[in-house]
Image (tube, helix red, strand yellow):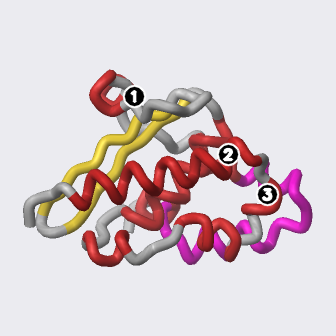
């Protein structure tokens, strides 16, 4: 497993966030994760991948190959990039059925991060979840 794949291990992320003792450490960890997105800024920051209706700029590219989903994403803000990193960790290399059954808000509550982010970011998480699930719902299987 290479360094990036290790970073995308959601169990490791949950463990590390839960080791943070206060909200400043949790937010710092999100910012730490943000530096690993995107993999290729020029390929992702295109109009066709933008998620409209958000205060922040968010780009999400979803691929379906070998019956699994791959997501690449980016944002213009560090905390949103950290949130995207966690969402990608949940979804990447997973089957559509797995993603459809996930509730992103519950995952952020499980890692005790949800109560530390403001309402705008909570709405963004919901929009990202809706966007991803809507896109994968339309994939011809």
Snapshot quadrant of residue 115: bottom right
121 on left or right of 89: right
Label at residue 51: none
Secondary structure of the residue carrying tag 3 is: helix
The magenta span reads: 8-29
Secondary structure of the residue carrying tag 2 is: helix
Q: Is residue 78 above or below residue 9?
A: above
140 on left or right of 27: left
Whichever of callouts 1 and 3 sits on the residue coming sooner in the sequence is: 3
- Separation of residues labelled 2 and 3 (CA atoms): 14 Å
Q: Considering depth in this image, is 97 or 88 the residue closer to the camera?
A: 97
Whether the magenta-drawn stretch holds residue 13 is answered as yes
Q: Mark 3 points at which residue?
A: 26
* Contact (Cβ within 8 Å) of mark 2 with mark 1: no
Placement of the C terminus among the 4 image quadrants: bottom left
Q: Residue at 12%, 66% (x, y): give it.
A: 66
* Nearest-to-viewer mark from 2 and 1: 2
Label 2: few (<14), some (14–19) or many (≥20) C-alpha neighbours in 10 Å: some
Q: Mark 1 points at which residue?
A: 41
Q: Where is residue 41 in the image (x, y as percent from the top left)?
A: 39, 28
Secondary structure of the residue carrying tag 1 is: helix
Q: Where is residue 133 in the image (x, y as percent from the top left)?
A: 35, 59
* Nearest-to-viewer mark from 2 and 3: 2
- Dominant secondary structure, magenta: helix
Whether the magenta-drawn stretch holds residue 56 is answered as no
Q: Residue at 45%, 31% (x, y): give it.
A: 52
- Separation of residues labelled 2 and 1 (CA atoms): 22 Å
Q: Considering depth in this image, is 2 or 5 the residue closer to the camera?
A: 5
């Amino acid at each position: 497993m290479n360094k990036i794949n290790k970073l995308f291990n959601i169990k490791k992320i949950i463990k590390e966030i839960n080791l943070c003792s206060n909200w400043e450490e949790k937010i710092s960890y999100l910012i730490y994760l943000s530096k690993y997105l995107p993999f290729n800024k020029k390929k992702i920051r295109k109009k066709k991948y933008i998620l409209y209706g958000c205060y922040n700029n968010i780009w999400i590219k979803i691929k379906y190959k070998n019956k699994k989903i791959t997501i690449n994403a980016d944002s213009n803000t560090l905390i949103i990039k950290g949130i995207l990193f966690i969402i990608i960790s949940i979804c990447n290399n997973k089957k559509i059925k797995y993603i459809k059954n996930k509730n992103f808000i519950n995952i952020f509550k499980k890692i005790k991060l949800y109560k530390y982010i403001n309402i705008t970011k909570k709405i963004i998480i919901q929009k990202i979840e809706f966007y991803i699930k809507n896109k994968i719902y339309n994939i011809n299987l």
